[in-house]
Every structure is written in structure tokens, then in C-alpha cells.
Image (cartoon, helix red, strand yellow):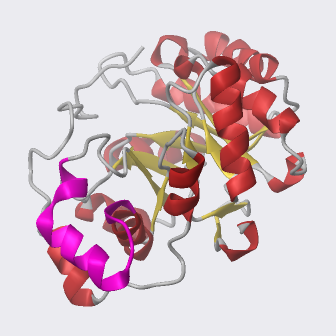
Amino acid sequence: MSNSVPKITLNDGLDIPVIGFGTYKLNGNEGAGAIQSAIDAGYRLIDTAYNYENEGTVGEAVRRSTVARQDLRITSKLPGRYHEYSKAVPTIQESLYRANLDYYDLYLIHWPNPKQDVYVEAWQALIEAKKWGLVRSIGVCNFLPEHMERLEKETGVKPSINQIELHPLFNQADMRKWHEENNIATESWSPLIRANDILTNSAIAEIAAKHNKSASQVILRWHHQLGAIPIPKSASPKRQFENISIFDFSLSEEEMNIINGFTRPDGRRKNQDPAVYEEF
């Protein structure tokens, strides 16, 4: 199954699959089993974070898996309370110790926390961690263009990827365009909105029926055709396989436009605007 998932190459040369697996709230033995199941289903891009408190669970799933470590792409993220350089470096090391991994493929700054205004220090720590071989590629989450422009201006290094809230109610058209113009990959968190409202939408149900697919498959295919990398989460092996099986059909331009039509200015799930939101 994994051979059927296309890959893209990031601006620093690392190749990653165009769909990943989210692990938020997958913890302990049960979580490790769910993540191992996802790897068995064909997922090779696995997303965690320091603040999810499950980096160890992800590491355990990697060890249980029969897939070689070099064939996986494991992501983790630096929390806001450790943005200062002197705190960020040991936190990245701690992330690796928790997972019992030698390196992360992707390491991201979780939020910019602009009121604290220390994200450039955090970025400098990620740059150093990459030089030391602790991480292979560095990026950000929830950053706005002005934040990323500042990173490149002050360090000479631009992010390889920006993981942002992106789903049918908030399609991030302007951000996606900016990413494309600046050769930064777009990754979608909460791609299915963590709710059932959109999955029971009649228009999406009609599109799904036409393609003999589920509503979630249609939405994830929409992400793919937008050029974004969705990271859906499910503990169900059946749903995991369903969510990754989106490469044998295509949505028409009309169908894409129907789904794009659901977006709205206030479409964020929890009003987490990166211009003001602070995450620690």
C-alpha cells in the first residue's frame, strides 16, 4: 500500500509522503498499537509533538513496526515555553530521548507566539539541531508570512514546511498561494475538522456517492488536489486504511469548487489566530 502514496521533495531535499498520520491523544500501549496499525496500513509520515506527551508512544510504535526506520518520516514540534535558545536545544534533545530515536525527520516550531517574540531564537536552535544531525528538516506550524519572512531575513534559512489549520471550512487560499510562491510545503492539521458536521454534509455525501468513496476520502482527496499534505488521525484500522486510500480517483474542478465554497472567514475551529494566539 505504501508504494501507492506519492511523495514530494521539500526545499531542503527531504522527500515526504503527501499524506501523513496524526497522533494527538494516542498514548500508551493502546496508542502505540494504533500507530503501529497506521504504519502497517501504509502511512510513513507520522506526526507528534512535545506537547502531545506521546513522543515515547510514537517511538514504541516505530520499534514494533517491521518498516525500516529510514523509510519513515517522523515529525515532532517545539512548544512555546521553550522558545529561548538555551531552552530549545535541550528540549529537542529531550524529544529524541522520549522517543528513543536517533533523529527526527522533521522538527517544527509549534506556534510563533508573537507576543513573546522569541521564535527567531527557537529557529536558530532548530538550525543548529539540523547541523548536528538531530533533525533532517526544519519547519514551522501556524506561522504567518511575516513570521516566516523574518526567519529567513534574520537567519538566512526558510522553513521547509508550514503546518496550518486547513479544512473545508477554512481553506487557507491566501496562505497556500504564499507557500507555493515561496517554495514552502503546506501541511494540514485538523483536515477533517475533528467533527462530524462536514462528514454528513449533503453536498459532500453526493460527491462521495458519485465516486463510491466515503466523505472523509473525498475531503482528504480535496486536500491532496489543493497541494496540501493532510494528517488525519484515527485509531480504527479500517478508517486508517480508508483515509490513505485516496489515490485511485480524482475530483473534478466543479467538485473542488463546491468544497471550496464551504470556507468562511471565521472558519477556524477555536479562533486560534496565529497573529495573537499563544501556546506554551
Q: Position of residue 157 (x, y in %)?
A: 60, 48
Vertical placement of 127 versus 42: above or below?
above
| Number of numbered markers | 0
Q: Within the magenta stretch, is there residue 74?
A: no
Quadrant in the picture for the N terminus: bottom right
Magenta-drawn segment: 197-216
Q: Position of residue 37 (x, y in %)?
A: 69, 44
Which residue is pictured at 17% across the width and 32% down the height?
271
Find residue 186 and report its image quarter. bottom left
Q: Within the magenta stretch, is there residue 201?
A: yes
Find residue 252 and report its image quarter. bottom left
Vertical placement of 255 versus 238: above or below?
below
Which residue is pictured at 37% across the width and 79% down the height?
212
Does residue 213 appear left or right of residue 124 in this picture? left
Does residue 186 appear left or right of residue 78 in this picture? left
Which residue is pictured at 31% across the width and 20% down the height?
278
- Camera-side residue of 157 and 280: 280
Vertical placement of 227 versus 270: above or below?
below
Vertical placement of 92 versus 39: above or below?
above
Q: Position of residue 178 (x, y in %)?
A: 35, 63
Which residue is pictured at 50% across the width and 24% down the height?
25
Q: Residue furthest left?
A: 265
Magenta span: chief secondary structure? helix
Decide if residue 213 is in sight here. yes
